[in-house]
Image (cartoon, rainbow, N blue to C red):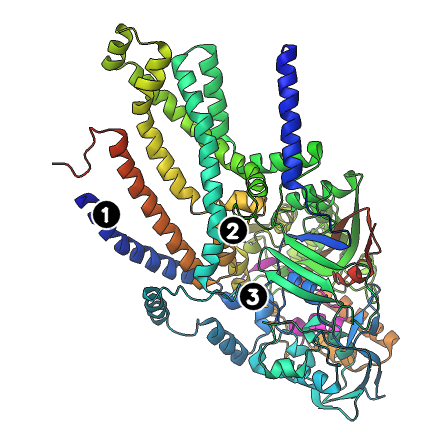
Amino acid sequence: MNWTNTRKLMTGLAIATALSTVAFALPAEAATLRMAWSQDATGLDPHTQPAFPSIRLLELIYEPLVRLDPELNVIPAIAASWEFAPDAKTLTFKLDPNAKFTNGAQVTPADVKASFERILNEETAAVARSNFLSIDTIETPDAETVVFNLKTADVPILVAMATINAAIVPASEIEAGKIGTETVGSGPFKLDSWEPNSREVLSANPDWAGGDIAIDGITISVLPDETAILASLRAGQTDFALLNDPLVATMVPNEANLQLNRVPGLAYNVLQLNPSRPPMDNLKVRQAMSCAINRQEIVDAALAGEGQVTGPLTMPAFAQDPNSLFCYEQDLEKAKQLMAESGVSGFTAKVIAATGEPPVAASEAQVLQAQLAEIGVNLEIEMMELNVYVDTWLAGNFDMAVAQNGGRPDPFPMYNRYFTKDGNLLKVSNFVDDTLDTLMREGQAETDPAKRVEIFHKFENHLVEQSPWLWLSTGYGYTAQLKTVSGFVPSPTGTLFGLTEVSIQ
Amino acid sequence: MNYVVQRLLTFPLILLGVSILVFVSIRLVPGDAITAMLGTEAGLLTPDQRAALAAYFGIDQPIWSQYLRWLSGLFQGDLGISSIYGKPVLSIILERFPLTLQLALMSMLISLSVGIPLGVFAATRNERPSDLIVRMLAMLGQSTPSFVIGVLIIYVLSVFFGFVPAMGTFTPLTVDPLASVGQLIFPAITLGFAFAASVTRISRSAMLDVLSDDYIRTARSKGASQRSVVWRHALPNALIPVVTLSGVEFGYLLGGAVIVEQIFALPGLGRLVLDAITQRDYALVEGTVLFIAFNFLLVNLLVDLAYVALDPRIRIGGR
């Protein structure tokens, strides 16, 4: 290449770079946090939205009575204080007198009562309704007090209230039928605009009772491909991002300008067996399968090491050392012996998994397939689109299912749906057991924290021994941020409430 | 003229067929708007709660009655209300269409302006090394999937140049032409890559055919220069298969480029359909697919008419 050509090329490149800088530079918004995520919220009604992105968004706009701190302790939100009666049948809240909705109205006991009545009303189709069925009556004796009278002793109800699915919304908005179309909350941010699957614009709520917020607002862009999110962070065009794919998250630390926040989540990866179908109805077969799998190997191979082996209880306050649980160390000899005792000599079963939900589902199924082949269990993997999977899963129409189920900060709301005699997902677990049912009831009524831990440890040990499901691992929740962003504290629940403490340099 | 009228008359019939097909097939897929919204939590609903939600989404009626209701709305220009967006379907489609149209036009422009000259160049150097290189490049272009090229472009831009095209939202051409073109140039290159390769191959082979025709030999014998023979005499005739190919491709592109829109986070028709299907927004799926089908039919009709302009020997519906 001669000099003239080189010069032309360089000039061309310079012009191209200049043009692209003009075209792509975003206007400087010093105090607005530019955030990105790959999945958008699916609706704005805090009582009916179960999807994680919706909950993450609504947690910034609405507030429940209480919330959980990053250690999963219950801390004040709209309620400044609370107290259980000794029999755990009455729960009394004192509201924060400074709590205000963004329409200027104070949050009153009447709003709390109306919100819970809306949640309990069957027509609302509220997601958290089943957690509040013990509520008998709600009293509002004065301008600051709300009293919940319960039909039975129900200690976990307090933790169940610490979710945005139990958000307090204005009674006037409920009456006007505007919940879900307009967002009048008492939370740290106001929703200025929402273009579904495209972007959200939030501005800081100056009247928020929780304190001052260092940023002016947040713009959230929906970038469906997480490698594009990483590129956008790398280029400094996104300040903060929520990541789901462990493989993308592990690339973040390679970038000098980026920081990865990683926190073990409560959701768990599990191989659900269907104990209503032979040969999974045979306890020895289920136990043999549990002994045959190598959980750490699944974490290493399918999750690229991004996870931890777990038992059924994923919340730190209740979790036991997984190695103390039945057959958590792979033991092929024992597995083969159990298979021989079961009278079943190898079998073929179909395992369902959802495409991309979680991103590691297919690889988990493949590793399980290889491991279980060692004891003559032949898995046929059937990958399904998420909706088809959900339909099949809800109908309990599977031999086995690779699943990622959501966790809760308390064992009772986490498992009563599957493993009590009147659990409403019994059709999915297909497993009724007297001991599990009794222990669940005891755990629900016990008020002494240490005794509760003891009860749920017994529950966990028995559950793992019965092996209706094979618990595998918990993954991590990831957020990534530019190093110019500081103050964010991640939480095992995945909440982005920590953004209230964030500042941008 | 008769031909055009005939074609226009078949439009409603084809669209009706498309609408029935889409209406039935989306409902045959397991899962509905309720499981799409609630996921596994849908199992916690009581029968009454489920019925209330089914009525809300309008899926409590038998399928034929849902279809008739939708069809009667269609005749009044009402494509229904999207359950995701809570807005009329038609207004959402019209918001998304400018991006899709601009992206389609830009990628066509890129592929034609690269593909035709390359094809002509290769044809005039038939079987020489430069021809072989062009053919190899064309083969590579056709066989590389757009998601590989898209991700690669984003990676190179962010790692080596420290920027990525604006993502998430779209700046229309009318608001800021420079930003708008700047935002779509890389997605257009990604989309245009494979099509440029097809255009190169088709225009090369068409050109080779034409160059061996008698009238070209006559032109040469009359002393016409190589440049004039190739560009004035041969190219217009060699373009007919390129027009056919472009018409079909343009029709596809107007349906939205799902993968490229997904990678570059562009709110176009392709992502709209994908989101509508995964979230079981029936009205939106039906409305958008119908709109896409209509565009496809229209583009094909225009391509047929373009033949006449390009080659006077063609008489559509001729006697």
Query: What residue span does the magenta drawing correspond to?
Result: A393-420
Give how far across and how far down residue B135 sits, in percent: 45, 20
Q: In this figure, what is the number of numbered marks? A: 3
How far separated are the C-alphas under marks 3 and 2? 18 Å
Q: Chain of mark 3?
A: B
Q: Which mark is residue B271?
A: 2
Give how far across and how far down residue A319 sits, in percent: 81, 63
**Which of A72 and B214 lies nearest the eye of the viewer?**
B214
Judge the density around disc 3: few (<14), some (14-19), many (≥20) Cα neighbours within 10 Å: many
Is residue B145 toward the left or the right of residue A441 in the image?
left
How far separated are the C-alphas under marks 2 and 1? 30 Å
* Mark 1 element type: helix
Q: Is residue A405 magenta?
A: yes
Using the image, determine if residue A56 lies above or below residue A141: above
* Circle nearer the N terminus (3, 1): 1
* Circle nearer the N terminus (2, 1): 1
Read off the residue under disc 1: B7
Give how far across and how far down residue B41 sits, in percent: 60, 69
Front: mark 2 or 1: 1
Question: What residue lies at 62% left-to-right and 81% top-to-bottom?
Answer: A174
* Mark 3 element type: helix
Read off the residue under disc 3: B37
Is residue B275 toward the left or the right of residue A148 in the image?
left
Label 1 is placed on what type of residue?
Arg
Give how far across and how far down residue B210 sits, in percent: 29, 18
* Circle nearer the N terminus (3, 2): 3
